[in-house]
């Protein structure tokens, strides 16, 4: 019973995390007249403040010494921080410039880009269904390029930057809160310097963009960054990876829905066709991953049964958590 309660709580945490990431396009327009660069700088500065308070409360400081003593790991954190800066900045700009649908596409195709990078950079081998999914995703990009009259560069940059960020995080192998603390620490001085420069030249909106309310909204970017990540971390330890893999699609689905229904962005037939191909590719990935997970569990049970028959040990019960995700999981805004 306790295990079921934990999984139920994990599911709610996961829905909350991806739901918040999916609804964040409603937040960034509230920060106008601040530009994307100023919003990004405030997000970096206030995120470190929020994470620092959390670290102080949890007394989790041991990782800092280990990170400092390992230059390669520190270099990877710096690279991750640089890449996520591009991702965050472009995402904020795209939302506030009327490109919410194209931004959502970036996170739809991110699993396909991650798989392609695994093949090209890590020498991973794909199953036939994965090859079909990647090919379908490439066809979708071509259709969307025709529909937009240009390559969907916002989507591609968001997808490739977040996939690169995920690759760096995989190699760093740190907890979500610790990783965010390290990344924002790397970004803190450049971000603070930029904000001071804006203030010195009379270009800051922190004190002149709308009074105390606007300043509080800019400061709350730290909470907007940290709270979904904490919820994601709580979900990750309570639910199977395959469940997180399915939940990750909530964020771009919500973003796409907001772009069409709330921001009233245009969706001509060519774009619908391109998105349909992307969704077909993701359906193939999900089906293939779940099928592989079932086969893996069945094989493990057969091996356990064979071992038990040979030793007289009890056979473990059937069932259990899925072990494979339908696509790479991640914290999208980490978006």
Image (cartoon, rainbow, N blue to C red):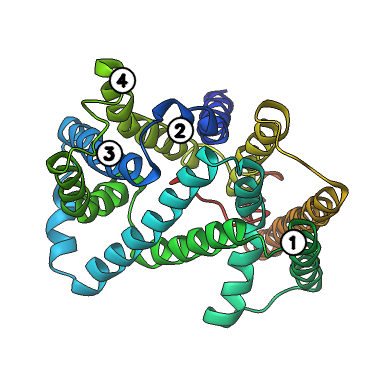
Looking at the picture, tell me which residue is in the foreground, 305 or 287.
287
Confirm whether residue 19 shows in the render: yes
Give the CA distance from mark 2 to mark 3: 12 Å
Residue appearing at x 24%, y 53% in the figure: 187
Mark 2 or 4: in front is 4
Residue appearing at x 41%, y 30% in the figure: 32
- Left or right, 119 with respect to 265, comes to left
What residue is shown with label 3?
Answer: 42
Q: Which x, y percent locates residue 269?
A: 87, 48
Between discs 4 and 3, the one toward the N terminus: 3
Provide the secondary structure element on which disc 4 rests. loop
What residue is shown with label 4?
Answer: 210
Q: Which x, y percent locates residue 333?
A: 47, 44
Give the CA distance from mark 2 to mark 1: 27 Å
Looking at the picture, tell me which residue is in the foreground, 245 or 251.
251
What residue is shown with label 1?
Answer: 149
Provide the secondary structure element on which disc 1 rests. loop
Give the CA distance from mark 2 to mark 4: 15 Å
What residue is shown with label 2?
Answer: 28
Please identify the quarter of the rendering in which residue 106 is found.
bottom right
Sort mark 2 into few (<14), some (14-19) or many (20+) by Cα contacts within 10 Å.
many
């Amino acid at each position: 019973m306790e295990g079921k309660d934990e999984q139920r709580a994990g599911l709610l945490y996961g829905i909350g995390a991806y739901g918040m990431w999916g609804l964040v396009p409603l937040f960034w327009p509230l920060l106008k007249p601040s530009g994307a660069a100023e919003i990004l700088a405030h997000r970096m500065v206030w995120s470190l403040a929020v994470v620092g308070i959390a670290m102080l409360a949890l007394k989790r400081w041991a990782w800092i010494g280990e990170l400092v003593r390992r230059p390669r790991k520190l270099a990877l954190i710096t690279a991750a921080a640089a890449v996520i800066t591009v991702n965050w900045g472009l995402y904020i700009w795209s939302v506030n410039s009327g490109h919410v649908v194209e931004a959502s596409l970036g996170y739809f195709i991110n699993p396909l880009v991650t798989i392609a990078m695994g093949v090209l950079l890590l020498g991973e081998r794909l199953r036939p269904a994965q090859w079909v999914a990647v090919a379908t995703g490439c066809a979708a990009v071509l259709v969307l390029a025709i529909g937009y009259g240009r390559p969907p560069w916002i989507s591609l940059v968001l997808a490739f930057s977040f996939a690169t960020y995920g690759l760096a995080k995989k190699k760093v192998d740190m907890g979500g809160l610790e990783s965010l603390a390290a990344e924002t620490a790397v970004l803190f001085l450049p971000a603070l310097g930029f904000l001071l420069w804006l203030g010195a030249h009379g270009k800051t909106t922190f004190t002149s963009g709308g009074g105390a309310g606007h300043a509080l909204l800019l400061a709350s970017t730290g909470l907007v960054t940290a709270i979904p990540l904490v919820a994601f971390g709580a979900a990750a330890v309570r639910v199977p990876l395959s469940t997180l893999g399915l939940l990750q699609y909530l964020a771009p689905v919500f973003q796409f829905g907001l772009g069409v229904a709330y921001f009233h962005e245009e969706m001509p037939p060519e774009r619908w066709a391109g998105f349909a191909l992307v969704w077909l590719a993701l359906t193939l990935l999900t089906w293939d991953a779940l099928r592989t997970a079932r086969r893996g569990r069945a094989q493990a049970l057969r091996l356990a049964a064979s071992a038990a028959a040979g030793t007289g040990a009890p056979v473990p019960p059937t069932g259990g958590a899925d072990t494979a995700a339908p696509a790479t999981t991640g914290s999208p805004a980490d978006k």
